[in-house]
Image: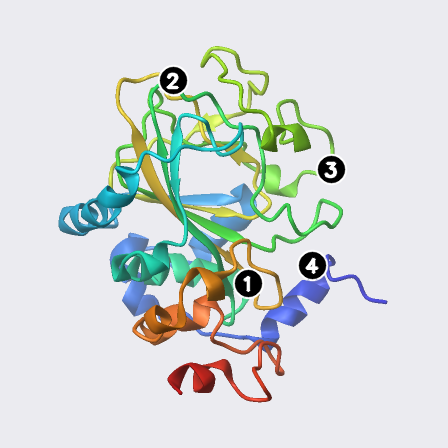
């Protein structure tokens, strides 16, 4: 039996959903470089950064859309979510502005190039770190696909900075090149107990401190894209203000999404979303016919 984790097999699978990147649409963000050059950086380092992608007006609209949900003051349930952190899930059901973010051409270009044009939106959430939040456990976002490392990545995560991300306020920390690492044990890595632990840790108590870690500082409206196999974590917020990001996360069309998007986004709301957003949440087909409903394309069922 051929191993889906084999990079050669994975490239063959992606050819089933082959796409062509319209570089003219992306040119204003590529700074004169070819898209393939950016992808080479992505393949080498496991991440890429694009500064100042969203205009200030769009960031303001996003803040306004999130405000009523953040004001509920719901905080994380464990050490992974962050007991001093607000998380807002099911964003595409909250406002159409989040569909615009999930379908942003720059983020989608990298997701589709890595995962195929029939990729899905695995999750889309806001993460608001409050002061005194401790550093997250190290993790990688496609870890729910349990196959031995090193292997191909089965995810792409976008990190949109809504607030400035600074060294003091908990900027996302990454381990460059770690998307290529094997399954070796990493100090401070995610453990099953992190999903039940509710104790508040001191921000200076960091069992996962790593000499190779980089704090990804970003100005508001900027974007980091990371492969699903890249080790990363939310940093400790030692500032006096919250730090807000939105992270759409993408997976292959054959993979189970982290959040059940078809339940998270009710059909009446899904029907009003742009077509590409509907495809991403699951109203689409992975070749040859994965995802059908009663023998027909799910779009036809939604349109009824």
Quadrant of the rendered structure where residue 34 is? bottom left
Cα distance, mark 1 to mark 2? 37 Å
Sequence-earlier tag: 1 or 3: 1
- Look at discs 4 and 2 and give the one toward the viewer: 2
Mark 1 nearby-residue class (10 Å; few <14, some 14–19, many ≥20)? many
Q: Secondary structure at mark 4?
A: helix
Up/down of 222 relative to 4, above or below: above
Q: Residues within 10 Å of mark 4 (few under 14, many from 20)?
A: some
Does the image show residue 151?
Answer: yes
Q: Earlier in the sequence, mark 3 or mark 4?
A: 4
Q: Which mark is residue 132?
A: 2
Q: Is residue 152 left or right of residue 203?
A: right
Give the spatial CA distance, label 2 vs label 3: 31 Å
Q: Position of residue 59 (x, y in %)?
A: 20, 47
Give residue 127's position: percent from left, percent from top. Answer: 38, 38
Q: Are marks 4 and 1 in contact (CB under 8 Å)?
A: no
Label 3, on which residue? Answer: 183
In the image, residue 160 lies at what x, y percent? 34, 45
Q: Nearer the viewer, residue 216 or 298?
A: 298
Q: Which residue corresponds to mark 4? A: 7
Q: Nearer the viewer, mark 4 or mark 1?
A: 1
Q: Say which residue label 1 marks.
A: 115
Q: Nearer the viewer, residue 39 or 196?
A: 196
């Amino acid at each position: 039996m051929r191993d889906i984790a084999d990079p050669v097999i994975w490239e063959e699978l992606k050819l089933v959903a082959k796409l062509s990147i319209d570089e003219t649409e992306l040119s204003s963000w590529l700074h004169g470089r070819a898209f393939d050059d950016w992808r080479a950086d992505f393949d080498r380092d496991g991440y890429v950064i694009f500064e100042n992608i969203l205009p200030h007006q769009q960031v303001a609209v996003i803040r306004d859309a999130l405000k009523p949900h953040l004001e509920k003051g719901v905080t994380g349930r464990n050490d992974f979510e962050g007991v001093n952190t607000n998380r807002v899930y099911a964003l595409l059901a909250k406002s159409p502005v989040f569909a615009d973010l999930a379908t942003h051409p720059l983020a989608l270009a990298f997701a589709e190039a890595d995962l195929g044009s029939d990729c899905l939106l695995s999750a889309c959430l806001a993460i608001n770190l409050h002061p005194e939040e401790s550093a997250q456990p190290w993790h990688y976002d496609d870890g729910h696909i349990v196959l031995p490392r090193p292997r191909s990545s089965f995810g792409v995560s976008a990190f949109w900075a809504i607030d400035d991300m600074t060294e003091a306020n908990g900027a996302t920390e990454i381990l460059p090149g770690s998307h290529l690492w094997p399954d070796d044990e990493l100090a401070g890595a995610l453990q099953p107990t992190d999903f039940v632990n509710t104790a508040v840790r001191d921000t200076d108590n960091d069992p996962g401190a790593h000499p190779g870690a980089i704090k990804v500082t970003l100005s508001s409206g900027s974007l980091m894209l990371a492969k699903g196999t890249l080790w990363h974590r939310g940093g400790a917020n030692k500032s006096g203000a919250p730090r807000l990001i939105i992270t759409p996360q993408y997976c292959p069309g054959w993979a189970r999404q982290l959040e059940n998007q078809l339940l998270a986004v009710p059909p009446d709301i899904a029907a009003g979303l742009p077509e590409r957003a509907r495809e991403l949440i699951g109203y689409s087909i992975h070749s040859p016919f994965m995802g059908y409903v009663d023998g027909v394309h799910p779009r036809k069922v939604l349109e009824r």
